[in-house]
Structures are given as structure tokens and as C-alpha cells.
Image (tube, helix red, strand yellow):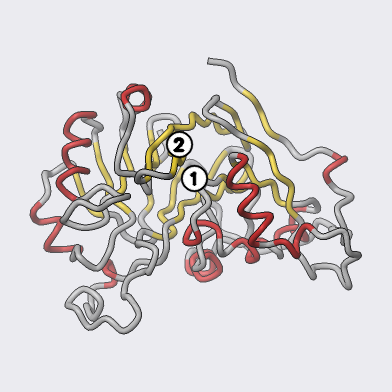
Amino acid sequence: MSWRSFTVTDHMIGMGARVLAGKFATTEFPGELIMLGTGTSTGVPAIGCQCDVCTSDDSHNNRTRCSIILGAPGGNLLVDTPPDLRFQLLRENIGVVHSVLFTHEHADHIFGLDDLRLFQFYLGHPVPLLCEENVEQRIRTSFDYAFTDRQPTHAGSIPQLVFQRISTDPFEVLGLPVIPIRLRHGPYFEVLGFRFGNVAYCTDTNHIPDESMQLLEGLDVLILDALRRRPHETHFGLDQAVAVAEQLKPKRTVLTHISHDLDYAATNASLPPTIELAFDGMRIPLT
């Protein structure tokens, strides 16, 4: 495989309001992956729902929208910007994001993008966004105010962002090698999962092509979509996710993008010993 390395260069800086590197408080977590959010697109509890999971006292059943963050050698690598991003970062005492990687363009994975706005001051340059072309197009449409030619009224009035195009070719960002994994997300969408060493993140999928399955062999940890017990048109159901895990045989499988159909304790009690539901704030070593 050939690898690319992404860095921020001087020509990326002159993009509107001037940004200056500043002080910030943050928790460091080198060599760890944190599950910032593990819930489906509505989150859990779901608005107005009175089911047993949505009204549960078990904090493991409180699930914000899906995202992870990795303590890479060169900084904090965020995967996706869900609507709950501000709350997630505050909860984990994470004060800065150095780069963002996107799986796909759906609302529950991009609509927290404006919460990146402070980081341009902390970093001293625009926040790099690594994504495929269709994701960039969706972000430019949904957040068009961030990409206007109009002179900003004041520093920080819009997020300072710079796109870096990725594909299924391996690359390196913040000193961390990344292997993109092509996944299917229902009949209309192709999305990306990512392999970081021997840990892989494959959310929002109901089909993994054979060539992608080969890229997921020999894992220590597989983080995999499992929406609910029943199959779904765009997500793995619980039994389907278990079948994928049993085929790939990672040492450990952690299930994410979970709806209120799955109670944390009851579901874990029914799963094989090496498979478990994720929960918000779970930490996984990068190996």
C-alpha cells in the first residue's frame, strides 16, 4: 500500500478572520480511543419516548449521537461531528481537536460542525477536515456561511476550516496510519469505516464487501454498527453484527450506533463473551 501524510501548511491560514494560537485546558489520552457517542440518529433517550430503555436509571443507556476521538501521536483526531459534540467534549474534558475525519455526510454525523469554531484560536490555523468529495459537498451546502467570500464581521464569527480529500487509499494524519474501509449503508450510500492499527471503526453499515472484510482481519478490537435486534434497511441488526464478528474473529467486538431497542445490561448478558455494547465514554486502547 502507498500512504499519504496530511499536514496544515502556511497557504491554508489566510482564510478569513485571523487566527492565533492560544492557551486551552484539555485532558490528554495518548494511545486511547474514546467512544464520545454510541447512539442512533435520534439519540437515547428518544424525545417523548417512555420505553424502559429511555426511562432507565442505567447511565449506559444514555447514548448521544455517534462519534469517536483518538489520542494520536500528533494530537486529537475526531471522527465525525455529531449534533451532541459540544456536550461530548465537555463531558470528557477534551479541550481541543486537531483534525477531523468523516465517515459520511448524514446529519447525525456532521451537524455539530460549528462546535469546531473555538479550535481555530487554540491551533493558530483552520481545522483540517478529512473527507470524501460527497461529504465536502454536503458540508459546504449545510454550512454555506462558513465558506462565503463575504468579509467576516469579527474573529470567530465563522468556523475556519480546510478540506483535505481522502479516498480508500491509506493515509497518515497526526502521525497515525489510517486505512479507510469501504462500507455499504443501505441501497443508496457508500460510507467509510477506518482501521487504526489493530482497532477498526465501522459504524453506519449493513453490508461489508468482501474486499473490505479482508482489511478487517487480525483485529484486536472491531467497533461495529448494531442498531437494534431486528434487521434494518441501512444498519446491521444485532444478530447480523454478531455474525460478522464471528466471521472476522477479532479479539473483542464493541457494538455502537445503538437504539432504544437494546438495553445495555440485558443485551450484554445475552451476547458471547467477546462481544459487548459500547457506552458513551468507553475507552479502548489503540494497538
**Percent coordinates x, y for residue 287 in the rendering:** 40, 33
Q: Nearer the viewer, mark 1 or mark 2?
A: 1
**Percent coordinates x, y for residue 220 in the rendering:** 31, 33
Q: Earlier in the sequence, mark 1 or mark 2?
A: 1
Check the image and name the residue furthest to the top: 1
Name the residue type under label 1. Thr
Element at badge 1? loop
Residue 242, relative to residue 52: is it above or below? above
**Percent coordinates x, y for residue 270 in the rendering:** 8, 53
Please tell me how crowded label 2 is: few (under 14), some (14-19), or many (20+) other residues with Cα within 10 Å: many
Residue 92 horizontal side relative to residue 148, left or right? left
Name the residue type under label 2. Phe
Residue at image position (42%, 57%) is 66
Query: Is the C-beta separation of discs 1 and 2 under 8 Å?
Result: yes
Image disc number at residue 194: 2
Residue at image position (75%, 58%) is 120
Q: Which residue is mark 1?
A: 103
